[in-house]
Amino acid sequence: MPLKQRTTSDWLRSFSRPLWNGPPLSGKTTGLLSLPRRSLAAKFGREIDGAVHIVVVPGEFGASSILPEDDFVIHEWEFDSNLPTLAYRELCAELQARVLEILTGKQGPVSALVFDGLHKLYDLVMRVEGWTPALIDDKEGGKQYVRYHAVFGNFLARALGSPLPLVGATCYDGLEPVEPGSKMTQIFPLLPGKMAKEVMGLFPVVFHTGRDGPRYYWTLQAEGKMQAAGMHVPVRLLKHFPARIEVVWKDGELRGGWFEVERILREAGGTA
């Protein structure tokens, strides 16, 4: 891979790697409807020749809040109830094959790829690498997390480093001790060990999702116990972002969300 000089378009692509982290029913998956795709090109004010592809990770069942459309493709798994156990290795191989098809254009033009259920992806990697519930309290088993982290990170790196305009993921909230052995906890993505914090370095944009009555919102800044939010963005652009972005339905249309992110970048002199 040769070195290259970054352009502003390169920066926008590297920035467009969001992670939506939050509790159940906080609008993580619903907000994906605001991502750029062909039918929304006019709303984004630019040409878009591609579809959003949502890959529902095996074991995740929260995608019923969205419906498939011509340019909003949902990939999910059907489990064979006749099998005595889940075939984790086969599931993982099929998942990797489908993602490769999306990355290489075999599923058609792609404007965005999102993994729905990142915590389930890590669980799948662990099981393929030999983890079982019997190892949960086993000290030697705990040492294997180094290998799990590496396999999980390598899987994500291929998608995040791809030329796709946007690659993202959703993940549940988890609690991590403030420091080893502490009973005080903070909210981070629901991933084991160091990956709970390291994943926030893999995704330049980490939103924490929440709900206030019928309104959903994405928090952009960590605050108090909630540390699962933040952005890697130039200071001159950071000051233009509010503390939270709302995601609301009004007059039958979804507003806010990634529409708002691109509007802010455009008006602040970014490249959206």
Image (tube, helix red, strand yellow):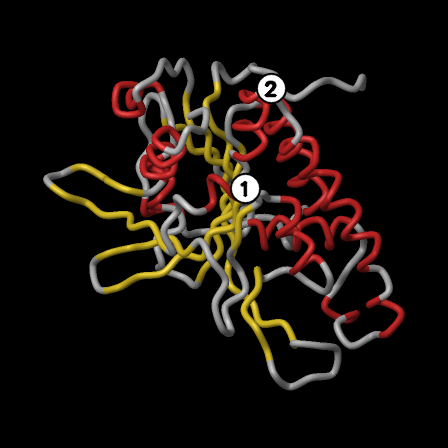
Q: Is residue 3 above or below residue 221?
A: above
Q: Which residue is mark 1?
A: 233
Would residue 199 appear left or right of 117 to someone viewing this image?
Answer: right
Quadrant of image for the C terminus: top left
Q: Is residue 106 left or right of residue 218?
A: right
Look at 55% across and 27% down and name the residue there. 13
Image position, residue 25 (x, y; %): 35, 59
Q: Is residue 200 above or below residue 115?
A: below
The mark total stands at: 2
Neighbour class for label 1 at 10 Å: few (<14), some, many (≥20)? few
Identified at 50% across, 68% down, the residue is 226
Q: Toward the viewer: 258 or 254?
A: 258
Query: In x, y percent, where is residue 185?
Result: 59, 78
**In the rendered view, does 180 fall on the left or right side of 254?**
right
Q: Is residue 1 above or below residue 60?
A: above
Counting residues from the start of the chain, the first of labels 2 and 1 encountered is: 2
Picture coordinates of residue 103 (x, y %)? 60, 22
Q: Which one is in front, 62 or 270?
A: 270
Residue closest to the eye, 119 or 35: 35
Residue at position x 69%, y 31% in the image: 158
Report if residue 139 is visible in the image: yes
Quarter-of-image position of residue 182: bottom right
Instruction: Give the residue number, with chain letter if any, for mark 2.
Output: 7
Q: Check disc 1 and give the amino acid type.
A: Val
Instruction: Spot the residue most to the front.
Output: 236
Q: Quadrant of residue 195?
A: bottom right
Q: Amino acid at mark 2?
A: Thr
The secondary element bearing badge 1 is classed as loop
Left or right: 228 as drawn, with respect to 137: left
User: Which quadrant of the figure contains the N terminus?
Assistant: top right
Q: Residue furthest left?
A: 251
* Residue at 38% over, 32% down: 262
